[in-house]
Image (cartoon, coloured by chain):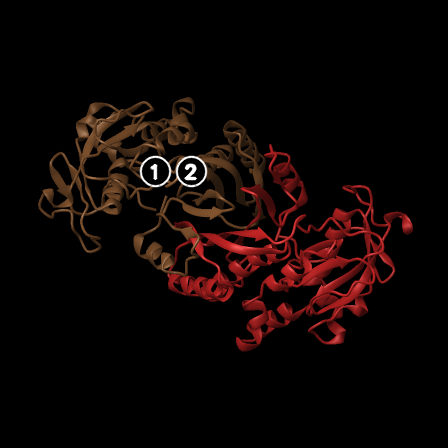
Chain colours: A brown, B red
Amino acid sequence: MSGELDLIERLRALPLHEGARNLDDDAAVLEIGGETLVLTHDMLVEGVHTARGQDAADVAWKLVATNLSDLAAKGARPVGVLVGFTRGKDEARFVAGLEAALRHYGVPLLGGDTVSGGPPRSHGLTAIGRASHVPVPSRGGARPGDAVWVTGTLGAALAGFEALTAGDRDGARAYLRPQALIEEGLALAPVATAMMDVSDSLLLDAWRMARASGANLVLESAAVPIALPEARRDEALRWGDDYQLLFALPAGLAPPVRATRIGTVESPDSRGDGGSDGDSDGGGALILDGRPIASPDGLGYSH
Amino acid sequence: MSGELDLIERLRALPLHEGARNLDDDAAVLEIGGETLVLTHDMLVEGVHTARGQDAADVAWKLVATNLSDLAAKGARPVGVLVGFTRGKDEARFVAGLEAALRHYGVPLLGGDTVSGGPPRSHGLTAIGRASHVPVPSRGGARPGDAVWVTGTLGAALAGFEALTAGDRDGARAYLRPQALIEEGLALAPVATAMMDVSDSLLLDAWRMARASGANLVLESAAVPIALPEARRDEALRWGDDYQLLFALPAGLAPPVRATRIGTVESPDSRGDGGSDGDSDGGGALILDGRPIASPDGLGYSH
């Protein structure tokens, strides 16, 4: 997840080490000792990123999965995590969920900090990964002519959230226990021209990929595989938390993982300028069903 | 800063990667690409770790300095940080303080996350450093016969806190803008048998060093250099936030940095067993002015 762009931009303007490249909001790349490390840090705030009253074990799982998903999108293999944990009555559940997630992914806990505070309580996690392919895939590499693909189905987390609200914990699994697509990311890293995980919504993240790439992402909403009834297709495309991988591949290349082609990349000057708004960086718009999307407002969840 | 030991122990029992050694609460060590990285993550919670109404620029500075202090105690040179920041009205001040601290230490911001939430707001920071000496100094290496030393003076942060409370911002500098002793840590790493930063209080941290080392730390309180009137010596030894380096050196060795000798390390069976309590790990007590300290309760600030 990411904050608003103006603050990120201000933070990014801070002095950057020569050996460090801040690719985008999702992860940082650090070359050290002949290895390329990928580092990511995400926070979860009670009641903001999690449902109130949610089992702390699920909160811990999600904290691990969302950070590892950022590594997956960079084709990085996790080497460890550090956790920042705010203590509370349910901390045994948090530790159980943390352990379950780390065992699931085979990732060690390297260290961290525990504090008192809240409500609301906040938890943070830093994940460190080893890049499997250099250059590390970024959201900014999509080129005109590429095809746009997405793994899995969209809207599964929304369906899960609704199941949870209705008291159906089993049906809520996609929301409560998201999966980081580590193996898929490793397979895609050598061939994808651009890649990111869909954390905030397919449309919002596609918009970001278009902007970062300076190219139009031309998507057909009907082509997107969804986990909701057809009547709710629009919601499926605007809800986040699915952690699927959105990626671009050179035309004609078949992806090495199960995925669905949902559009193409076009030159930014191939269609009007409907996509330009105040912070345009030389073009790159989301074109949905033939209509340029002028603003990211309403495309998904920004937090 | 650290949470209570039981939780840390439970977290530590989680699966650990072969290449990773979780030295103690302060920092983790990760060998990668022929380099030894030191990683640390600390959180600050509004009103818990910072005074209410404190300038967000000072909060950001402290967040950087406390994490870099953990690297200093490991003799590591910082290579970058990731920040987890909860947004608010004063965020421009936070960014200004973050920038000032990172410029001061010449450390790049690699990335991070910004979220909404609170009050209270929480911020986290992960610092990554490159070890200058292997084995990396830990709190657990003090050996009988060593001398115990500390840099600087204790109680300066307490005096600063009191100045702040009295509205004297200039006099509060030691509290508001603590310094991470990076150069001192680099100089000490090759010679210190044990080292840690004094974040919670000299006595509490000395107690921890004794426990981790399985040796008695025999301190003379009168020898400790303090920044408060003599009548308040005891407070100076029990207040935290000074971020001085506490270290052990082989007998007869002069430290390569300005420091004061405050005691010696003795074998744990050289004096009774007054230091043993429930979680004894084979001895190691703090002996203050000839009296064994049986429990860490009241020695300093635990949070």
Q: Is residue A138 left or right of residue A96?
A: left
* Number of marks drawn: 2
The x, y position of residue B52, in whole percent, is 51, 63
SS for callout 1: loop
Q: Is residue A106 visible?
A: yes
User: Which residue type does callout 1 highlight?
Assistant: Ser
Q: Chain of mark 2?
A: A
**What percent of the width, then of the height, locates residue B42?**
55, 52
Residue B170's image quarter? Answer: bottom right
Secondary structure of residue under mark 2: helix
Q: What percent of the width, then of the height, locates residue B225?
A: 74, 71
Q: Amino acid at mark 2?
A: Leu
Which of the 4 image quarters holds residue B28? top right
Q: Which residue is mark 2?
A: A71
Q: Chain of mark 1?
A: A
Which sits in the foreground, A272 or B10? A272
Of tags 2 and 1, which is closer to the observer? 2
Mark closer to the chain start, 2 or 1: 2
Front-most of residues B78 and B159: B78
**Res A38 quadrant in image:** top left
Task: Answer whether residue A121 is visible to the viewer in this image.
Answer: no
Question: Which residue has dot 1 on it?
Answer: A199
Side (left or right) of B229 relative to B74: right
- Are dots 2 and 1 in contact, CB under 8 Å? no
Q: How dense is the environment of label 2, judged by Cα within 10 Å: few (below 14), some, or many (20 and up)?
A: many
| Mark 1: few/some/many CA within 10 Å (<14, 14-19, 20+) | many
The Cα–Cα distance between marks 2 and 1, rounded to whole angstroms, is: 13 Å
